[in-house]
Image (cartoon, helix red, strand yellow):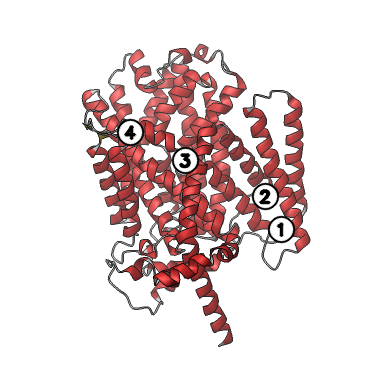
Amino acid sequence: MEAQPQDSISDDPTPRRSYWRWRKQDFFPEFSFQSLSSYKSALSATCPRLADRLLARSSDAYEIDAARRESEHPMRRCLTWWDLLWLSFGSVVGSGVFVITGQEARVGAGPAVVLSYAISGVSALLSVLCYAEFGVEIPVAGGSFSYLRVELGDFIAFIAAGNILLEAIVGAAGLGRSWSSYLASIVKNDSDYFRIRVGSFADGFNLLDPVAVAVLLVANGIAMSGTKRTSWLNLITSVVTVCVIVFIVAVGFTHSKTSNLVPFFPYGAKGVVQSAAVVYWSYTGFDMVANMAEETEKPARDIPVGLVGSMSMITVVYCLMALALTMMVKYTEIDPNAAYSVAFSQIGMKWAKYLVGICALKGMTTSLLVGSLGQARYTTQIARSHMIPPWFALVHPKTGTPINATLLVTILSAVISFFTSLDVLSSVFSFATLFIFMLVAVALLVRRYYVKDVTPESGLLKFLGFLFLIIASSVGVSALWNAGVRGWIGYAVTGVIWFIGTLGLALIPKYRVPKVWGVPLVPWLPSFSIAMNLFLIGSLGYVAFLRFIVCTMVMLLYYVFVGLHATYDVAHQHMEQAKFEGES
């Protein structure tokens, strides 16, 4: 049965207050922050509170109903599977495919880059299946944050949410800078044409970019004005992108030469796999669309069809674009910086570079639009849990959108994009997205096999043992590959361990079945998703691990001093209310 959050919120007897309010109580209503003495008392109880919240799990009912009450007004159910399909397409198909394809075909995988896209597409599709089941079962704005909070607990959900939100904000800032660079290249053939140089500022922060800020403000302003309006705008611009892509593929195959595909594996299997880890970023963005579940009309139908349908279509599109490029131009002659534009110039269609540039601009624009929607809703659900001030959870009664959360994301990304260059921004990216995709697959297995007060202790121990084998063997394969080990023995051993772990899960009973729609072939598909995501994580290098560790440590400081005490107060307040209602 699908939840109807509008009814539950509208029945709330709490009197409505002005949306725009700025009292301390609106930001920190929890008892721990009411006075200095109460905060000192909370800090002195940090250890027992941390022990209490470390493995504390939320529930489907709380996320679907009680948490939504923090927003005071409902988000409007106005999206269908058709909207979700094109929102996902607009979010995922940005400028990346026009840049990354040429780079990886030239120096990474050669013509076999089409296989790199296929491998990454399969991995992304497995993650989409996991997101779709959760989206049907828990149709709320928080996406992966809510899924992880329900199945893996508050602490892991906070760490994952903090990192993905950081990447989303930095990614939006990077898109804003890229948009400015593309426009400047079209107008003046100088990517810094619209930027203001300040000599007294440090390198990497001395090119101020007002165009990037303007683009972010416009995109987020549209997102704040209404979800359906943003969806329609995305649909119109995405259709334009499809027309350009069809043109590129058609011209590419018309001027293709099969001889350009020889040799097909110039950099070997290692090149194909390493390129798969790189081109995977062309598939990211669908998780932002999963955050729109609360605004879908029929989640049980719309989410699986929209997400799975769009990712299947995108995988085919990417493979065709990669194949068209490598058949049109010999991989050794591909320009890694402007592959498609130069390829068209070589066949006498110099004007086509403007078409590619405009399409890339459009792709970045829709990525910004959909990203604005998804990031704000992710932030909203985090605020509903009180991990950040609940003021950011408020939904505006007229627009039905979380304006406060959108403003937070907008201001942070705009400030970063104004000062920070693309090379600095790119160094901040990490494996957080893949890490969360892996955690969602783990959470799906936990959901199927462990139900509190139902799963016997022996069943839980078996499940944890088999899950450990799956994760350990997946890490082992990734470590062997990235260490340069090419003998078959190590891979055979880790592969057998993975198989035993997955087979073991297949043989023990499940204690929960999906109510409406679920991932097929459980545990095999989620287990394979865990393996593929961990394998791709291992291909990202030590810098990504270092960034993840540093950012996580900073987030832990915030959690220990603020987030932990807020969530503890809220959780125990609800426990007292439930106890009181039970006694009455």
Res 53 seen here: yes
Residues at circles 1 and 2 in contact by the CB criterion of under 8 Å? yes
Mark 2 sits on what residue?
Answer: 522
Mark 1 sits on what residue?
Answer: 510
Is tag 2's residue or tag 4's residue first in the polypeptide sequence?
4
> Badge 4, how many Cα within 10 Å: few under 14, some, many 20+?
many
- Residue type at mark 4 is Ser
482 or 147: which is nearer to us? 482
Q: Secondary structure at mark 2?
A: loop
Question: In which quadrant is the C terminus drawn?
Answer: bottom right
24 or 431: which is nearer to us? 24
Does residue 530 appear left or right of residue 367 in this picture?
right
Instruction: Measure the C-alpha gap from mark 3 to mark 4.
Output: 22 Å
- Kindly identify the residue that appears in the image at 26 percent across and 31 percent down: 183
> Badge 2, how many Cα within 10 Å: few under 14, some, many 20+?
some
- Kindly identify the residue that appears in the image at 47 percent across and 36 percent down: 281
The numbered dot on residue 284 is 3
> Badge 1, how many Cα within 10 Å: few under 14, some, many 20+?
many
Instruction: Please identify, in this view, whether the residue under mark 2 or under mark 4 is nearer the observer.
Output: 4
Instruction: Measure the C-alpha gap from mark 3 to mark 2.
Output: 23 Å
Instruction: Please identify, in this view, whether the residue under mark 3 or under mark 2 is nearer the observer.
Output: 3
The numbered dot on residue 421 is 4
> What percent of the width, then of the height, locates residue 486?
69, 23
On screen, 393 above or below 463? below
> Badge 3, how many Cα within 10 Å: few under 14, some, many 20+?
some
Instruction: Please identify, in this view, whether the residue under mark 3 or under mark 4 is nearer the observer.
Output: 4
Residues at circles 3 and 2 in contact by the CB criterion of under 8 Å? no
- Residue type at mark 3 is Thr
Q: Secondary structure at mark 4?
A: loop
Does residue 456 appear left or right of residue 121 in this picture?
right
Instruction: Please identify, in this view, whether the residue under mark 1 or under mark 4 is nearer the observer.
Output: 4
